[in-house]
Amino acid sequence: MDCCTSDGSCSTSPATAAEGQAGVYNVSGMTCGHCKATLTNEIGALDGVLSVDVDLGTGQVTVTTSGEPDDALLAKVVDDAGYELTGRAA
């Protein structure tokens, strides 16, 4: 499944995202479109994840899930992908 559109956005429809719970995370090491696609695919493959929006400019990743986001699991997936989840955004 390819989530990226021709304009470079990598998230599912806003209507789907509104149905879940969103968590915004600070992630270091993201620099390019490949980083964005990698994190979108890796996080998006987790059970319960409805959408993933990676913002390279702010270094933040918004994850919308069907239940409470599992911060420890998200940190592991991000770290295993070669990036560092440094915590939730304030």
Image (spheres, helix red, strand yellow):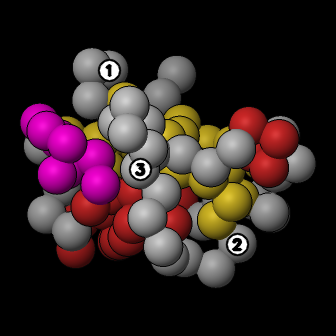
Name the foreground residue: 36 vs 86. 36
| Amino acid type at mark 2 | Gly
- Magenta span main SS: helix
Q: Amino acid at mark 1?
A: Thr
Q: Disc 2 to disc 1, how far (Cα)? A: 25 Å
Horizontal and vertical percent for residue 48?
A: 70, 72
| Residue at image location 61% in from the left, 42% down from the top | 23
Question: Which numbered disc, 1 or 3, marks the residue that appears first in the sequence?
Answer: 3
**Residue 32 placed where, x, y %?**
13, 38
Residue 23 versus residue 65 in the image, above or below: above
Q: Quadrant of residue 78?
A: bottom left
Using the rendered image of the protein, determine whether residue 75 is visible from the camera's viewpoint: no
Name the front one of labels 3 and 2: 3
Q: Which residue is mark 1?
A: 58
Residue 41's place in the image compared with 45, above or below, is: above
- Residue 36 x %, y %: 28, 47
Q: Which residue is labeled 2 in the image?
A: 48
Amino acid type of the residue tagged 3 in the rendering: Cys
46, 69: nearer the viewer? 46
Q: Which residues are magenta?
A: 30-37
| Alpha carbon separation for disc pair 3 and 2 | 19 Å
**Closer to the camera: disc 1 or disc 3?**
3
Q: Residue at x 49, y 41 (%)?
A: 53
Residue 90 visible in the picture: yes
Query: Is 86 one of the magenta-colored residues?
Result: no
Label 3 sits on a secondary structure element that is loop
* 50 left or right of 63 in image: right
Q: Which mark is residue 4?
A: 3
| Image point (51%, 66%), residue name | 44
